[in-house]
Image: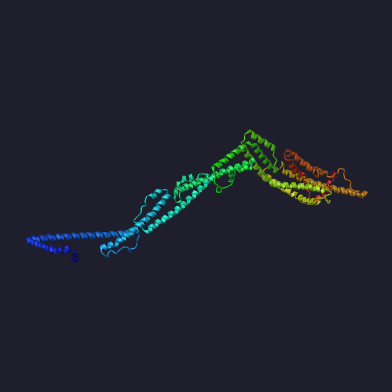
């Protein structure tokens, strides 16, 4: 108080004592009574008490407000620490240290620091949650979700919660990257398919979603579930369309090839449609050339097939006769007898009458050709052995002629070659019986399987083989008779020599001629006679076949007699006539 009064001279002059002294002087001068003086002093004292009382009440109110502020600051401090997830108590000041104002002064900077930290944390939460909300909107296909600011829970701004949001954001970013990769793959597939099919890629892909255009950035493309589903559906539709178009194009290419082959189309004309036929055997995945399955290309192929069909109808007779010639050639190679003239007349009648569609006629002929090829294939094994048999018979005939040649051992040109051929011919002739047995077995098995007779150029093969066996037996009998006849002549000659003396040589019969009975192709007339019966029965066949082929085929079995190697030497006398039985 003294210090205050020293600084303020007015206060020093107006103290309570000096003022009371001055009041007494005034009262003395006025002449106030003691009673009045006491009353005024009591009033003055009461007013002083009222002033002190008001000051005390004001001080108490201020203290209460400070305490409330301190309590609020401590509560806010606790709330901020809880919201920020701060567990350290180092930031919390001791409640009992210092005055109330000192405690408030100690808490204030901590609160300010926590408020700044909270604002930064809210900003981080808002940024992460905004990105999450945006990606969720892109996945859901509702971009309006990102227009509204995210609702942030300010009661939990801990780093743990922020890490959870960041982990969620990373997962969403990963999913977005995967979805974007799928979208780009789908778009690339759509581009390739549209190129192959000759379709407009821009209109196709923007019909799915406008953001899929190449002009938009990669990150701006839609990755929603609906976009992915529509892209997948578009790809499936385009692949199915590609499959159907390829199938259609391959059918057209096959038809074109068949028609070209049918009408012997020039290679230059065929090359005009190489872009169609090049994919005739390709799989769906192998067709990647742009425009190779365009609709105009398929329409072009359809027009060409239609044109060739019309051309085929005008050339039906020529085509049908060509197929008939192919059928006849198959039967000729298989030695199956048919009546080509009747078949051609029937084809002419069917075409001229118009009762049969050209396609049906050609299909029926194709079916006949397929069956003929199947039958020829089943006959091949037997026919190969028949060829071997006939070749052996030809060698047998040559060997007989060779054995009758008295000059075969002369040192003439080519004699050594004939000798080698004779050795090979004897080996081949010795195999004829086994070959015939095999042929009989295979022929019977074939007839049982097919329930029909196996004919060779119209003659049953088993009948030919049976005739061969019979002629072989007759040949053996003829040999036996010739041996007996020769023995008889030698015996007669010996008896005559013993009675009349020796003679230069036995007399030959007048009918003996060189070549004798072989002049007609056999050792006796029987083989030629039996063969002529078969030839007569198959007369119609022989007139329609090529004469060269018939002569080649029929010349082999003229002599059905097998000559063994040891019998070949005994045929030196084969030129002698056959005398009557003794």
Picture mark count: 0
Q: Position of residue 265 (x, y in %)?
A: 63, 41
In-image side of 523 versus 252 (left or right): right
Q: Position of residue 553 (x, y in %)?
A: 74, 43
Q: Residue at x 78, y 48 (%)?
A: 396
Name the residue nearer the viewer: 242 or 518.
Answer: 242
Instruction: Identify the image quadrant of the N terminus.
Output: bottom left
In which quadrant of the rendered view does residue 26 lie? bottom left
**Residue 20, above or below 467:** below
**Residue 343, above or below 101:** above
Name the residue nearer the viewer: 173 or 564.
Answer: 173
**Residue 103, above or below 129:** below
In-image side of 214 versus 361 (left or right): left
Q: Position of residue 78 (x, y in %)?
A: 31, 60
**Residue 520, above or below 85:** above
User: According to the image, what is the colour scheme of the structure?
Assistant: rainbow
Q: Position of residue 403 (x, y in %)?
A: 81, 49
Q: Residue furthest right?
A: 500
């Amino acid at each position: 108080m003294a210090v205050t009064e020293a600084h303020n001279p007015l206060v020093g002059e107006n103290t309570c004592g000096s003022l009371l002294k001055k009041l007494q002087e005034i009262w003395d001068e006025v002449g106030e009574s003691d009673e009045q003086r006491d009353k005024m002093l009591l009033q003055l004292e009461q007013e002083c008490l009222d002033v002190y009382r008001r000051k005390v009440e004001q001080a108490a109110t201020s203290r209460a407000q400070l305490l409330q502020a301190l309590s609020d600051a401590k509560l806010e401090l606790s709330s901020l620490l809880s919201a920020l997830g701060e567990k350290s108590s180092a930031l919390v000041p001791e409640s009992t240290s210092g005055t109330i104002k000192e405690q408030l002064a100690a808490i204030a900077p901590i609160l300010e620091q926590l408020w700044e930290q909270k604002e930064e944390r809210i900003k981080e939460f808002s940024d992460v949650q905004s990105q999450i909300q945006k990606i969720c909107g892109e996945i859901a296909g509702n971009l309006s979700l990102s227009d509204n600011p995210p609702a942030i829970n300010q009661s939990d701004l801990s780093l743990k919660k922020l890490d959870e949001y960041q982990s969620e954001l990373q997962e969403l970013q990963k999913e977005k990257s995967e979805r974007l990769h799928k979208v780009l793959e789908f778009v690339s597939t759509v581009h390739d398919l549209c190129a192959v099919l000759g379709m407009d890629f821009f209109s196709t892909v923007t019909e799915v979603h406008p953001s899929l255009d190449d002009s938009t950035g990669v990150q701006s493309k839609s990755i929603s579930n609906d976009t992915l589903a529509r892209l997948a559906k578009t790809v499936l539709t385009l692949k199915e369309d590609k499959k159907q178009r390829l199938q259609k194009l391959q059918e057209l290419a096959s038809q074109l090839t068949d028609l070209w082959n049918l009408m012997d189309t020039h290679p230059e004309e065929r090359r005009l449609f190489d872009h169609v036929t090049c994919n005739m055997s390709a799989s769906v995945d192998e067709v990647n050339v742009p425009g190779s399955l365009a609709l105009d290309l398929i329409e072009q192929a359809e027009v060409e097939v239609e044109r060739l069909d019309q051309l085929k109808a005008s050339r039906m007779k020529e085509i049908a006769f060509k197929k008939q010639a192919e059928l006849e050639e198959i039967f000729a190679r298989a030695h199956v007898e048919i009546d080509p003239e009747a078949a051609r007349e029937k084809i002419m009648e069917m075409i001229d009458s118009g009762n049969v569609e050209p396609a049906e006629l050609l299909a029926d002929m194709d079916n006949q050709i397929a069956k003929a090829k199947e039958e020829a294939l089943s006959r091949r094994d037997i026919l190969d052995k028949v060829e071997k048999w006939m070749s052996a018979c030809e060698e047998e005939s040559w060997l007989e002629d060779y054995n009758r040649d008295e000059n075969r051992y002369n040192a003439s040109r080519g004699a050594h070659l004939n000798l080698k051929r004779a050795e090979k011919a004897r080996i081949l002739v010795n195999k004829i019986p086994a070959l015939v047995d095999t042929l009989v077995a295979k022929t019977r098995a074939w007839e049982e399987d097919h329930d029909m007779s196996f004919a060779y150029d119209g003659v049953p093969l088993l009948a030919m083989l049976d005739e061969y066996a019979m002629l072989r037996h007759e040949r053996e009998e003829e040999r036996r008779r010739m041996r007996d006849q020769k023995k008889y002549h030698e015996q007669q000659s010996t008896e005559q020599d013993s009675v009349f003396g020796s003679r230069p040589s036995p007399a030959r019969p007048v009918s003996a001629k060189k070549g004798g009975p072989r002049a007609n192709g056999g050792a006796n007339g029987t083989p030629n006679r039996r063969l002529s019966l078969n030839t007569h029965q198959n007369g119609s066949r022989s007139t329609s076949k090529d004469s060269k082929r018939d002569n080649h085929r029929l010349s082999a079995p003229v002599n059905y007699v097998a000559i063994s190697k040891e019998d070949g030497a005994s045929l030196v006398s084969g030129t002698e006539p056959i005398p009557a039985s003794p």
